[in-house]
Image (spheres, grey):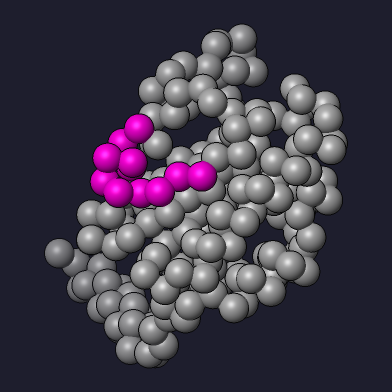
Amino acid sequence: MSDRHQQRQQRLKEQVDARIAAATETRGILMVFTGNGKGKTTAAFGTALRACGHGKKVAAVQFIKGEWPNGERNLLEQHGVEFQVMSTGFTWDTQNRETDTAACQLVWQQARRMLADDSVDLVILDEITYMVSMDYLDLNELVDVLNQRPAQQSVIVTGRGCHRTLLDLADTVTEMRPVKHAFDAGIQAQQGIDW
């Protein structure tokens, strides 16, 4: 190993060690997975799998999603993850603002319950950004509930077009960016890969 390489690696190690030493606060975090790329929900459920693997209690609310088969749900429910699903499907299919708003509000009450439960370590609010942008759910109410959640509870918010207020509130924000997608080339979405 060259001396220059070893010196670079030592400097890197010192920087990483300093960042680890500086991180002294312990509390739940708010994560946002947003952007136009594929993988926001998958990333959230990957985190849920990790949490379950460490014996954490996880709950998930899926806004927008319908009743079609869901591989993540099939697996996570076997590990005690509670799911509440809006079940109306995509709003461009229903095209009924009144029923979509009522369905959102119904499942939002379940989310509020989860976000007040200090036995739940991680809550996933999948596709909730759409509920805010379409005015099915009041942004201020969402922010208030997030701010009042138990101190050790982490939350993941997913969806495109996340409101700036939520981005500012979040501890971690990841933006998925599309580079290339098979669907754009006419390849059908596949069970077990795309959902």
Residue 103 in sight: yes
**Up/down of 71 relative to 35, above or below:** above
**Up/down of 33 relative to 3, above or below:** above
Q: Is residue 93 magenta?
A: no
Q: Residue furthest left?
A: 1
**Up/down of 12 relative to 89, above or below:** below
Left or right of 126: which side holds 91?
A: right
Left or right of 148: which side holds 141?
A: right
Pick the quarter of the image with the N terminus. bottom left
Residue 187, x across and y down, in percent: 55, 11
Camera-nearest residue between 184 and 44: 44
Residue 101, x across and y down, in percent: 78, 43
Q: How many marks?
A: 0
Camera-nearest residue between 107 and 162: 107
Residue 83 appears in which quarter of the rendering?
top left
Left or right of 32: which side holds 29?
A: left
Residue 140, x across and y down, in percent: 77, 69
Residue 143 appears in which quarter of the rendering?
bottom right
Q: Is residue 76 magenta?
A: yes
Look at 53% across and 48% down and name the residue there.
Answer: 61
Residue stretch in magenta? 74-84
Look at 23% across and 54% down and name the residue there.
Answer: 53
Residue 35 in sight: no
Left or right of 157: which side holds 12?
A: left
Look at 43% across and 54% down and name the residue there.
Answer: 59
Camera-nearest residue between 183 and 113: 113
Look at 38% across and 90% down and name the residue there.
Answer: 24
